[in-house]
Amino acid sequence: MHWRKSTYSGGGDGDACVEIATAPTRIAIRDSKAPTRATLTFPAPAALVDHLKTVSGG
């Protein structure tokens, strides 16, 4: 995955940095101070909409 600093991260000395990585169907988020620890993943917005359409029969 290609990680980049989120535009929502605070400035300064980097002590409030969140990194994100995107894939076609997922978005991953991690703490830049602890990159080997757990990563949160969420469906990408388009994938979530497609899934909801499938579940609802739309």
Image: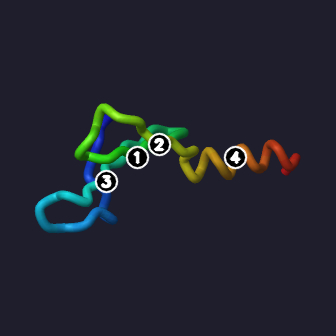
Which residue carries the number 3 mark? 18
Label 3 vs label 4: CA separation?
Answer: 27 Å
Q: Residue at x 54, y 47 (%)?
A: 44
Frontmost residue, 19 versus 14: 14
Binning the other alpha carbons within 10 Å of mark 3 as few (below 14), some (14 to 19) or many (20 upward) gives many
**Kind of residue at disc 2:** Leu
Which residue carries the number 4 mark? 50
Q: Classify mark 4: helix, strand or loop.
A: helix
Label 2 vs label 4: CA separation?
Answer: 21 Å
Q: Classify mark 2: helix, strand or loop.
A: strand
Q: Residue at x 19, y 67 (%)?
A: 11
N-terminal label among 2 and 4 = 2
N-terminal label among 1 and 2 = 1
Quadrant where the N terminus is found in the figure: top left
Q: In which quadrant of the rendered view does residue 14 lie?
A: bottom left
Q: Is residue 57 left or right of residue 35?
A: right
Which residue carries the number 2 mark? 40
- What residue occupies the far right of the structure in this picture? 57
N-terminal label among 1 and 4 = 1
Q: Residue at x 32, y 47 (%)?
A: 31
Frontmost residue, 22 versus 19: 19
**Kind of residue at disc 1:** Ile
**Marks 1,3: beta carbons within 8 A:** yes
Q: Classify mark 1: helix, strand or loop.
A: strand
**Kind of residue at disc 4:** Asp
Binning the other alpha carbons within 10 Å of mark 4 as few (below 14), some (14 to 19) or many (20 upward) gives few
- Which of pointers 2 and 4 indicates the residue nearer the eye? 2
**Kind of residue at disc 3:** Val
Label 1 vs label 2: CA separation?
Answer: 5 Å
> What colour scheme has been applied to the protein in the rendered image?
rainbow
Which residue carries the number 1 mark? 29
